[in-house]
Amino acid sequence: MSDPPTEPALAPSGDSAPPGWKRSLRKGALVLLVWCVVFEAGAWVADAIWDFRAPLMERLKTASGSPDPVPETAPDWPAGVIRLRVPDRGEARETPYALGGVVIEGAWPDAKLDPMDADDVAERANGRPRVFVLGGSAALGYPYPFDDSLASQLQQRLPEHAVFNAGQVGWCAGQVLGLAQVLLDRFEPAVFVVLSGNNEFIQWSPATSPEDDPAVQRSLAHSRLLAAALYLGHRGNTGGTRVPQAPLVGYRHAIDHPDESFPLTSWAQTRTAHLDAFGGHLDALVSRAEHAGVRVVMLTVPFNPRLSPSFHRLQPLSARGGPVGEEVRALARRGADELDAGRAEAAVATAREALALDPEPAALHALKAAALEALAELSTGEAAIHRNAAFDAYVESRERTIGNLGTRVGVNVTVRSVAARHREVALIDADAIARERWRTGEPTIEDDCHPTPAFHGVLAARVAAVLSAGTATPTSGTAAPLPPEGGP
């Protein structure tokens, strides 16, 4: 008889070698870990060269996600370091820069900011008094070349000073205050030139939703490898906070694409809270600067009155409910159709009828403004009257716009009030200068909120005159008359 079959030998137990598949799994995990470490190390080196994480973090700061004002916030930079705009590196743009269907001539929307410590700043200052230009992208000089910015043109006029461009894209006054404190602590400023107020609503949203919360992306960006991937993704999104496909100027888009989800009646409380926070941050900045013996030159915020109300956020067409609200919406659509058909006088009458029922919606004021402009083109003896009325209606539209870049009158009233409370603050009313330039057709703002190079030159001349005089200019009696805030 043949021997019975033998049982297969059992694998040794205890500390003996694992089966082959487990060994392969562990080896693969180790290889993957090594490659992750290599790629992450490479990403850190790449970040040191190309500096992609910091601008990503700045962009994530401007993402919507809170109904509350931004508090005082220290810069998210290494201790003892600030980020300053430096000369352009000579890269060439292959296509013109366009925003909302408008080509911005001479634009260079790739401003470069480099980290600098106190020694770097002292070396560049070389014993001269240090002037820091603070604020958002308008202060930075975006979207134009380095040499066209307020800081660069001020440096040309004041070679006896060292002017540093500390503007930051998308920053609110709370963040500007945090940077000012860092400068006071470590960088020995002599003068702050403050152009802030464009971004007080840039992070506002009616409510936070998980998919809109940028906190997850900020956490992932601690990895330089993931930060690089996020940076590339955000570079492809050129819209930022604005509505996709929204035109830069015009009235029709806001009427054709209304958003009634956020009640207009609750906006008054929101804007008041944000303006109060804005004023408090400016007050604190000035007080701390005065305590440290640092002079402050403050500018009101110039703005583009013709910006479409729906450029950054779709707007409601009525604050009224029921039949009155429906009538207002119907009048808005009828007025837009009349204006498109060339019936400017009828469109003005329809817009006024709608505003008599509901003076709140920004889109109605924009419609009225455009209709008055068209009427001025058809008129002779009253053309100037219609143009002035159109300008005031455009300003009223901007004041009543919900969200980012709205409440322009309120922002500038706050700036003037802060300057008036501090006798040593020099106030330059850039808003008043801009209004006069708009009326005379001089280059002022070609995009949504950024002064042109020519306008930066005008503002630089005003700041230089103040600093050369050595004393603060008066803070009262210089402002242009403001349009009425209520009613059509």
Image: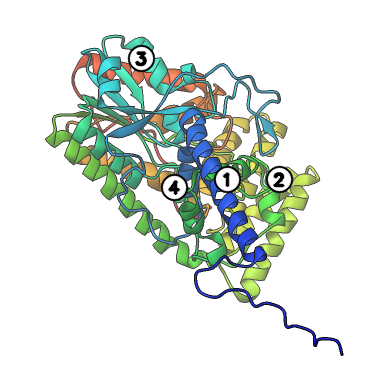
Residue 159 left/right relative to 234? left
Residue at which label 2 appears: 345
Residue 434 left/right relative to 332? left
Q: Which mark is residue 35?
A: 1
Q: What secondary structure is marked by label 2?
A: helix
In the picture, residue 136 is in which quadrant? top left
Instruction: Give the distance between the C-alpha atoms of the residues marked 4 and 3, in whole angstroms.
Output: 38 Å
Residue at which label 4 appears: 484
Q: Residue at x 87, y 90 (%)?
A: 1
Q: Position of residue 368 (x, y in %)?
A: 62, 47
Q: Which mark is residue 155?
A: 3
In the picture, residue 116 is in which quadrant? top left
Type of amino acid under label 3: Gln
Is residue 303 visible in the rendered image? The answer is yes
Instruction: Give the distance between the C-alpha atoms of the residues marked 3 and 1, in whole angstroms.
Output: 48 Å
Type of amino acid under label 1: Trp
> Reading the chain from its start, which is encountered first: label 3 or label 2?
3
Residue 168 left/right relative to 239? left
In the picture, residue 421 is in which quadrant? top left
Rendered view: 459 above or below 172: above
Q: Which mark is residue 235?
A: none
Instruction: Give the distance between the C-alpha atoms of the residues marked 4 and 2, in whole angstroms.
Output: 22 Å
Which is closer to the viewer, label 3 or label 1?
Answer: 1
Q: What secondary structure is marked by label 3?
A: helix
Is residue 393 visible in the rendered image? The answer is no
